[in-house]
Image (cartoon, grey):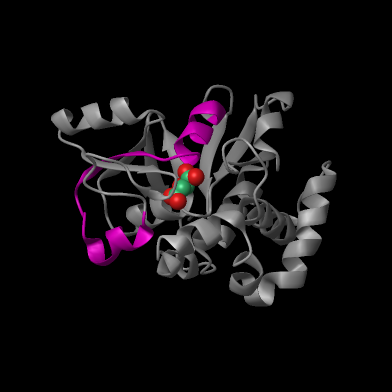
Amino acid sequence: CLSPELVHLHDLKNKIVVVVDIFRATSTMITGLANKVSSITPVAGLEACRNMKSKGYIIAGERNGQTAEGFELGNSPLSYLNNAYAGKKIAVTTTNGTLTIEKSKKDAAEVLIGAFLNLQATADYLIQQGKDVVIHCAGWKGMFNLEDSLYAGALVSVLANEFDFDCDGAIGMKALFEQNQGDLKSFLSQASHAKRLQNHNIDADIDFCLTLDKYNFVGKLEGEELVKVSLN
Ligand code: MLT
């Protein structure tokens, strides 16, 4: 669903929902899992996430692209590299991504975390499971954004021979991804959130979030926590 505000029109029951927030929530979650955090718990609200600190969690909070007041971590994937938080329980809240996970988990059969960083692994998992799929783009404050929709096009492109897509948006974004896959950074440098991050001198995150297939595992929500699922 490329337009987040319309996701309620989709029946998520019995479907696998791939939640995507490329800049940067889902990219950061996948990076944390790749760098041996013990668990990642997405939390929709700032206060609820702050309260997780007293339960032994490292708290990560972002609003409008910057680290939220009173949080140890913001939402940069680079913070987790080199196993910097290996063995730690992370609770995270972001402007759009964690809210989108919250909305999806109510009805979905399964919720996966989609990122360019693990695109092929997510596609392989979806083929293996054979269920219907909804790609739920976080967007920006309920509205369409370019990077999440381009990820949807990329996933549709990789799955094109295995699934039928009944959404013109998916078909359109597949074409747009295929036209720009050779240089995603140039194309996405014009995206509104990329510009917002550039204004905060967070360019390095953009490059990292656009790295294709750096990791070969699936991020999946089990209960309240994200876990790493390796394909056999
Ligand atoms: C979001 O939730 O919209 C993003 O993660 C924001 C960000 O990290 O810059």
Q: Quadrant of residue 227?
A: top left
Residue under the point 68% across and 71% down:
181
Query: Is residue 90 magenta-colored?
Result: yes
Magenta residue span: 76-104
The quarter of the picture where residue 204 lies is: bottom left
Horizontal side of 69 relative to 99 (left or right) equals left
Q: Residue at x 70, y 39 (%)?
A: 3
Quadrant assignment for the N terminus: top right
**At 53% across and 48% down in the image, what residue appears?**
21
Q: Nearer the viewer, residue 192 or 144?
A: 192
Residue 106, relative to residue 146: is it above or below?
Answer: above
Residue 185 drawn above or below residue 137:
below
Q: How many marks?
A: 0
Residue 127 point in image, percent of width and height? 65, 50
Residue 111 placed where, x, y %?
Answer: 53, 36
* 227 inside magenta stretch: no
Does residue 114 appear in this view? yes
- Which of these two is toward me, 167 or 194? 194
Relative to 134, 92 lies left or right: left
Residue at x-position 52% and y-position 42% = 112
Whether residue 216 is visible to the viewer of this picture, yes or no, is: no
Which residue is most to the front? 199
Q: For this view, does 136 lie left or right of residue 84?
A: right
